[in-house]
Amino acid sequence: MTWSTRFRLRQWLRSSLWVVPLAGALVGLLASAGSVAVDRHVTFPAGWQYSASTAATLLSTVTGAMVGLIGFVVTISVLVVQMATGTFSARYMRLWYRDPVLKAVLAWLFGTLTFSYSLLRRDESGSVPDLGVTLAGLFVGIGVVLFLLFLDRFVHRLRPVAVAALVASAARQSGSLPDREISALDLAALGEPPAFVVATDAHGAIQAVDHEGLVAWAERQDAVLVFLEGVGDFVSAGTPLVEVHASAFPDSTESEIRGKIALGVERTIEQDVAFAIRIMVDIANKALSAAVNDPTTATQVLNHLSDTLHSLGRTRHLDGVTALADAPGRVRVLMPAHRFEDLLSLAVTEIREYGAQSIQVVRRLRALFEDLRASVLPEYVDAVEAELARLDATVADSFGDDVDLDLAHVADRQGIGGPLRLHSRVIVREAKRR
């Protein structure tokens, strides 16, 4: 099985809503058989013994209750899907499908359903599953608690700012590239025509690549791999994807390289932080639409975008090229990558355009740029200054003759109404004023 197949399988298992519940149902069947086996060899105290009619009634009630709770969970899930696609971003649904609490609740409820139903079929006069009935009651109690936790979790997650925080957290957990010292790159070899070019045999978005596997392959073949497309790009079948530069023709086929590149129907966050930024920007854009007109939500999304950009602004080598080296430090793989200015533009351009008439949005953007200018690496300051200049032009165009022009030029982390930001000079000035 290739690396790309394993990656897609992991993605499918994480996104699937039926695999874990099915496993829970199977565990419920096995547990019911185990409880019946224990009942045959153990005599329980009188307080744990049930009559056949009582056991049948209790098990029937448990079975019906589990069907009802499963119906509630499915109904809530459908409502979340409708609200998420209409209010947040359709791209958010990928994170919803993967939520472990949703799958755990469904697995527990299905497991309890199959457990109680299986015991109900075994319930006969003179052979009452005493242990099973007691366990079924315990499982119901746990299932109700899990259902309440599920309801509380997703009621809180229906807020756009909570969704933005979830996406920002996923972005921080996205795979990072190894930080290796690069000692040599044979530019002369790259100037020659490649030994061969690997083309895609299917269409889709490049979801991830096997960094370690590609470096190991290139080192083994004494080659350099040059990617023509980057992670997140959508490619059609037959698109040239990788140039293989080598002094001798490698002794392996193109399929081995293809097997280290995962294609899918949509982008993922695992190696694509720009996709996480895209989702957060989509949420802010919908909040700024004429139908919603909620600049406060856009301002809150900017808080999480600011945190993501601060983290990226302290990351070196966001210069448009990802270079992967082997252990001795020789470059083996070159890939297109996002520059810091690309990510910054992605994060703020549309929000600036759609929120141009909102003082709250432009003030929060100004605070974001001023904070970034003071915290990012020196090589990224020019990009921040360029975005600040664009913001100034947008404010001049939107508020040029407006009485609030002076307010639109103030940086405010809360958009409007934020407290005065103190530093030593401000503290001295305020103390003298008093």
Image (spheres, helix red, strand yellow):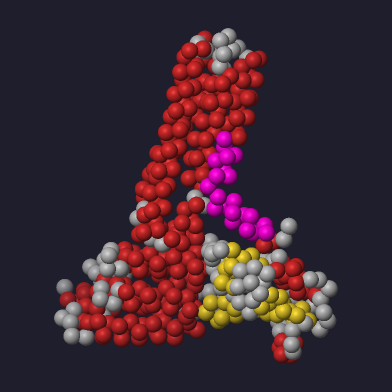
The x, y position of residue 343, in whole percent, is 47, 75
**Residue 88 pos. (x, y %):** 38, 60
- Between 117 and 218, the residue placed more toward the observer is 117
Residue 327 showing in the rendered view: no
Instruction: Say which quarter of the image contains residue 366.
Output: bottom left
Q: Is residue 100 left or right of residue 370?
A: right
Start-end of magenta stretch: 5-25
Q: Quadrant of residue 248?
A: bottom right
Residue 15 inside the magenta-drawn segment? yes
Quarter-of-image position of residue 72: top left
- Residue beneath the point at 40% across and 43% down: 75
Residue depicted at x 57% and y 68%: 205
Query: Magenta part mainly helix, strand or loop?
Result: helix
The residue located at (41%, 48%) in the rendering is: 78
Say above or below: 147 vs 198. above
**Quarter of the image where the N terminus is located:** bottom right
Query: Residue 172: within the magenta?
Result: no
Q: In the figure, is residue 2 to the left or right of 376? A: right
| Residue 238 in view in this figure | yes
**In the depicted view, which residue is nearer to us: 3 or 142?**
3
* Left or right: 185 in relation to 80: right
Q: Position of residue 243 (x, y in %)?
A: 70, 80
Q: Quadrant of the C terminus?
A: bottom left
Name the residue: 64% across, 76% down. Answer: 239
Image position, residue 377 (x, y; %)? 49, 79
